[in-house]
Image (cartoon, rainbow, N blue to C red):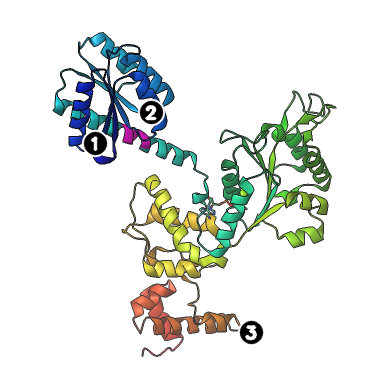
Amino acid sequence: MADSTQILVVEDDAKHGAMCARLLERRGYRAKATTSAREALSLLAQNRDIDLVLADLQMPEMDGIQLLSAVKGKYPHIEFIVMTGYGTVKTAVEAMQLGAAHYIQKPLDHDELNLLIKRAIEKKQLEKKVDRLRAELQGRYSFENVIGKSAVMQTVQEKMAAACGNRATVLITGESGTGKELVARGIHYNTFGVGALQDADAPFVAVNCGALPKDLIESELFGYKKGAFTGAVSDSEGLFRAANGGTIFLDEIMEMLPDLQVKLMRVLQERSIRHLGDTREFPIEVRVIAATNKPLVESLESGAIRKDLYYRLSVITIHLPALRERAGDIPLLAEHFLKKHQKDFHKTMNGFEPRAMEAMMKYPWPGNVRELENLVEMMLAYGKSAVIRYSDLPERIVEIVPSQKKPSMMDDEVYTLKEAERMLIINALAKSRGNKSLAAQMLGISRKSLYKKLEDYAIPEN
Ligand SMILES: Nc1ncnc2c1ncn2[C@@H]1O[C@H](COP(=O)(O)OP(=O)(O)OP(=O)(O)O)[C@@H](O)[C@H]1O
Ligand SMILES: [Mg+2]
């Protein structure tokens, strides 16, 4: 660590400066000495790798304090230690207030100097770490949060990246719980400086077109003037204007009435908005991201969405595959949610029993990623062991038919429930090599009820 640290010594007494630099080199730092503050500034401008400046307070022309404020103004990340021959506390305090890490009295105590440098470097590294953590925190909705290594999810991530470079409208499709809003936020929070679309402070306004009474959506979206209709007791700027400079996320777009779709078209074309009961136009710069959990083809055929609006919205389309279509992502997601929620439950669980994961990968997850996340939270709330066990999983997940038998049972043949149950039991016994406790566990029933069923169905006990 020390060997990569670069120190610039600024000392008008050339001899003392050179000695200081040599001393530092002997301690493993890279050091350079210069005799004037001006020269120091030009060296700093040329060499971006300097981490720390060690400067004399008393210098002709520009003194240490002036140099300090110049350096801190231009390169706030560079640490600064002042040397003083007189040890006047007043100047030292002034230096600290200006951002010096410390001061040291001449003649230099070598050990003290070494310690101060070490501390300054540590402080700098800590600050770097804090910066990085802050950036990570602000990246709450960054792409890394969209988990998935499957080919389909890689396509999703590529399309997200493409959407971030411009202000094109995006249409996101996918079943409930597949992550549509997560992707919309990911795009928003990673779009910077495109046209009037701004940085991370830009608003993200989510509107659920299905949640509000249809007659209210229009006034909510486009705003209104006082008195425009009964109940409009004051002006409202509406959600579109609230999203100005950022993103409006129109969730459940298929729920929007055709009349309103026409108005939305107009807004997209004109890039301006008119409040209800108003004649003025307000220019707006808003990225529109729409989402639906309805299959597109059906919605187009049934007329739930106007074709012209569909073409406007679907400049970039992102389809989020159902979780069962990318079962390979399930372990990754499950581990992610385990880590994510552990602290809420003040518990540490180290992953999943292989059999538990196997069952989870076979389960079809009708509620998709949301259902998986909820399950992991539930396991964290109730789980008592160090890992999530197969036997802890809810019935709906473990009662999934073992894969070998599944095709034949789902085929064209029809079984009675009893026949099916008998087959499942035989299958479980075969898989557990006759171990009844294990078979009972696989079937999600007690040992006792397994024995009873063996008797009822006259299944030979090996
Ligand atoms: N790929 C993913 N990686 C990590 N978390 C995900 C992923 N997909 C979804 N989630 C999480 O699952 C939950 C549901 O996601 P989201 O609300 O975005 O789904 P949705 O498609 O908008 O659902 P709905 O149609 O019901 O509104 C959220 O907590 C989200 O963080
Ligand atoms: Mg949603």
**Distance of mark 3 from mark 2, alpha carbons?**
79 Å
**Distance of mark 1 from mark 3, alpha carbons?**
77 Å
Q: Main secondary structure of the magenta part?
A: helix
Q: Which residue is mark 2?
A: 44
Task: Tell me the magenta residue range.
Answer: 124-128
Indicate the amino acid at tag 2: Leu
Indicate the amino acid at tag 1: Tyr
Q: Is residue 215 left or right of residue 164?
A: right
Q: Residue at x 70, y 35 (%)?
A: 239
Q: How busy is the neighbourhood of tag 2: few (under 14 within 10 Å), some, or many (20 plus)? A: some
N-term-proximal mark, 1 vs 3: 1
Residue 1 visible within the image: no
Q: How busy is the neighbourhood of tag 3: few (under 14 within 10 Å), some, or many (20 plus)? A: few
Residue 192 visible within the image: yes
**Distance of mark 1 from mark 2, alpha carbons?**
17 Å
Label ID, residue 104: none
Residue 327, horizontal then vertical, whole percent: 51, 66
Residue 223 appears in which quarter of the rendering?
top right
Q: Which residue is mark 3?
A: 412
Q: Residue at x 51, y 68 (%)?
A: 363
Q: Which residue is mark 1?
A: 29
